[in-house]
Amino acid sequence: MSNLINDFTSTGSKFFFHQEAMEKLRDGKGKVITSHLMPTDICQHTCAFCSVATREGNVLTMNDMKVYLEQLVPLGLKAVIISGGGNPLLFKCPETKVGISELITYVKSLGLEIGMITNGMPMKRDDNGRLVWRNLTGEAMDMLTWVRISMSGLDHKEKEVYVPEIGGNTTLGFSYVYHDIYYEP
């Protein structure tokens, strides 16, 4: 059982495999390796367990995210996790009106790996007949290194989890928070 714990949970034991990074941190010369990017706090669900129970409808601009990432890449940034206090699939830049596919394409153009945490959304067939989330192109989906889908849809009106057809290079995972409190969105 201990191997499973070390393989699939965040324990301090993983630090021993990154001695060089740990020495740099100790010497005050640490580098940014991964950054969370939370483009929106807009969400179609109101989950009882959500840490952002009250949302204000905040949305970052593409320009702000570009400036942020362009400052981190020279410092050693290797990966971005797109998540947030909302569903990142609902991102739409208030200035340029571009969406999540364009954001993913931009992050990938910087040579970064990309993970995404989402609760999903209804599906559509793209131009190639592939089942994808309605706000995401199949091409952008293929740029993701991994996706974790919260199964919170089981607790809401849809009573299902929307799972896209992923390419062979994207790892797919799921999470579910068991609770006895439910708020209607």
Image: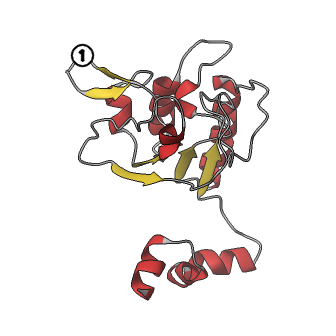
Q: Position of residue 147 (x, y in %)?
A: 43, 46
**Residue annotated with mark 1:** 127
- The residue nearer to you, when weighing 63 against 178, is 178
Quadrant in the picture for the C terminus: top right
Count the marks.
1
Q: How is the image coloured?
A: secondary structure
Quadrant in the picture for the N terminus: bottom left
Query: At x 63% / y 40%, what residue is drawn?
Result: 69
| Farthest front residue in view | 180
Query: At x 33% / y 48%, what residue is drawn?
Result: 170
Q: Position of residue 133 (x, y in %)?
A: 39, 27
Query: At x 32% / y 35%, what residue is drawn?
Result: 164
Identify the element where label 1 is drawn. Answer: loop
Q: Position of residue 123 (x, y in %)?
A: 36, 25
Q: Position of residue 64 (x, y in %)?
A: 71, 29
- The residue nearer to you, when weighing 148 against 15, is 148
Residue 92 vertical position relative to residue 177 in the rendered view, above or below: above
Q: Mark 1 packing: few (<14 Cα in 10 Å), some, or many (20+)?
A: few
Drawn side of residue 120 relative to residue 75, left or right: left
Q: Amino acid at mark 1?
A: Asp
Drawn side of residue 90 relative to residue 59, left or right: left
Query: Does residue 116 appear in this view?
Result: no
- The residue nearer to you, when weighing 110 against 182, is 182
Question: Which of the 4 image quadrants contains residue 33?
Answer: bottom right
Query: Does residue 175 appear in this view?
Result: yes
| Farthest left residue in view | 129
